[in-house]
Image (tube, helix red, strand yellow):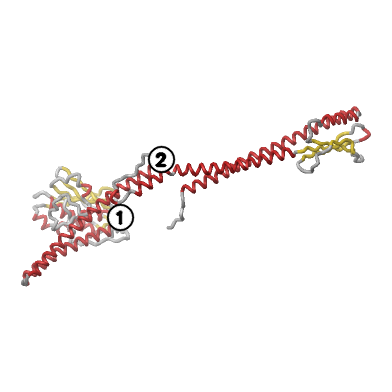
Amino acid sequence: MSRSRVGSLGRRLSYWLALQSLVGLVVVCAAVYAATHLGFQSRQSEAMAQKQVQLQHLLAEAARDGDVATLKHKLDDFFIGHPDMALALTRASDGSEFYRRAAPNTALDQRVARFTVPAPAPAQGKLDAVLVLDIREDAVLLRRIGITLALAALAGILLVSVGGFLLVRLGLRPVRDLVNQTRQLAADTLHRRLDGSAQPEELEPLIAQFNELLGRLELTYVQMEGFNADVAHELCTPLATLISSTELALRKARDASELREMLGSNLEELQRLASIVHDMLFLSQADRGAVARRVSTPSLAALAQQVCDYHEAALEDAGLTLEIAGDATGSFDTPLLQRALSNLIGNATRYAQHGSAVRVEIVQSAPGEVQLQVVNRGTTIKPAHLPRLFDRFYRGDASRSHSERNHGLGLAIVAAIARMHGGRPLVSSSEGISSIGMSLKDGMAEPGTSAPASPAAPGVVPER
């Protein structure tokens, strides 16, 4: 599944930080502006209400006293110190003017209150009052506050964006350091590990996992190098034998019996090469995820007895007896189990103590799991060899004894067959008793592929 390109993490973090700063500052500035505007409106409304009450009080007193001159004098005194206010009093009966304090020469930026008051003389009836408050200064101040807030928001966004970019770049420095460390890794420097001493806590699990991966890669690379050398060695020996024998045959004329004998020897070497190639193809198929073709197997003991019958001559020559202990049923790949058992019994035959017994143990270790092991008495396998016993071409014997018959893939095939059955290889050795085998998962037949192995032609077993 394709994924869209993510882009630079640093730029994305910087953009998001700038956007969040923009939204945050705009919201704050808008809130400050709105609160200031509401404050001005509240103060203006309160001032208008107070002046209206005072005017109504003055006019009510004048209506009781009937002194118009005193009233106008009090009204003039009332507006001293309030140049932003104006008042117009007109008679309601005829619309004539009773009192006027000039209003500002503008129709905008003002608040107007209209109300009715009693006239100083009862005969005059009512007066219509128009009280005007000039709010231009407040409007100018509000505009200045708005402009100041807008400029402060822009400056704040710029400052936060630049600071955020620098902080993000500084925060991502450990990631760049890791990139520089990984650039220095190559096939010949897999022993190096990433230095996480100066890394943030969030990257420590990633560094630990990456270092573990490097360890596995290093081990795999070392094993691959050794495997390549072992493959070259195993193939080189029969090829050298074939070349030398063919050159020897071509040096002079030979009779039919000599040529037949030489061709027979060459055929053995070719069969050895074919066996190596066949086993390598089987292991390659298993590594690609091949699974066993499961069929109902009524008795693993009966299957083991068939393989034991095939090895009867070899066991007799080695002075060994063979026992089968336990039994189990399930769904397994019978040809593969025969091949694995043949490899295990052949391996035990070569290393068991003369006159001892080789025992095939079949144990139902858990529901749906069977353990199949071959136990023999002989030389104790060194603990250092146990983890690598199932590696390809691995031999505990550095001298590669029996290399003309065994090319070191038998136990690797056993491990592959165990994995194809959902299990794992098993090995233990102490006090001269060695047990090598595998665990198998019982189950119904699953789709997959597996390389067939004939019990009549078992694979060659590796040296320990």
**Residue 119, above or below 251:** above
The answer, for residue 346, to whether it is visible in the render is yes
Which mark's residue is nearer the viewer, 1 or 2? 2
Q: Which mark is residue 200?
A: 2
The answer, for residue 295, to whether it is visible in the render is no
Percent coordinates x, y for residue 409 in the rendering: 20, 56
Residue at 38% across, 47% down? 179
Amino acid on which disc 1 is placed: Gly
Query: Residue 38 occupies which quadrant of the picture?
Result: top right
Q: Quadrant of the N terminus?
A: bottom left
Label 2 packing within 10 angstroms: few (<14), some (14-19), many (20+): few
Amino acid on which disc 2 is placed: Pro
Residue at 27% across, 55% down? 330
Q: Residue furthest right?
A: 123
Instruction: State the CA–CA distance, disc 1 to disc 2.
Output: 47 Å
Q: Which mark is residue 248?
A: none
- Say what secondary structure mark 2 lies in: loop
Q: Nearer the viewer, residue 358 or 432?
A: 432
Label 1 packing within 10 angstroms: few (<14), some (14-19), many (20+): some
Q: Nearer the viewer, residue 132 or 181?
A: 181
Query: Residue 257 occupies which quadrant of the picture?
Result: bottom left
Is 281 positioned to the left or the right of 243 in the image?
A: right
Picture mark count? 2
Disc 1 target residue:
443
Is 4 positioned to the left or the right of 399 in the image?
A: right
Which badge, 1 or 2, is on the more N-terminal residue? Answer: 2
**Residue 264, above or below 314:** below
Percent coordinates x, y for residue 266 in the rendering: 13, 65
Percent coordinates x, y for residue 116 in the rendering: 85, 37
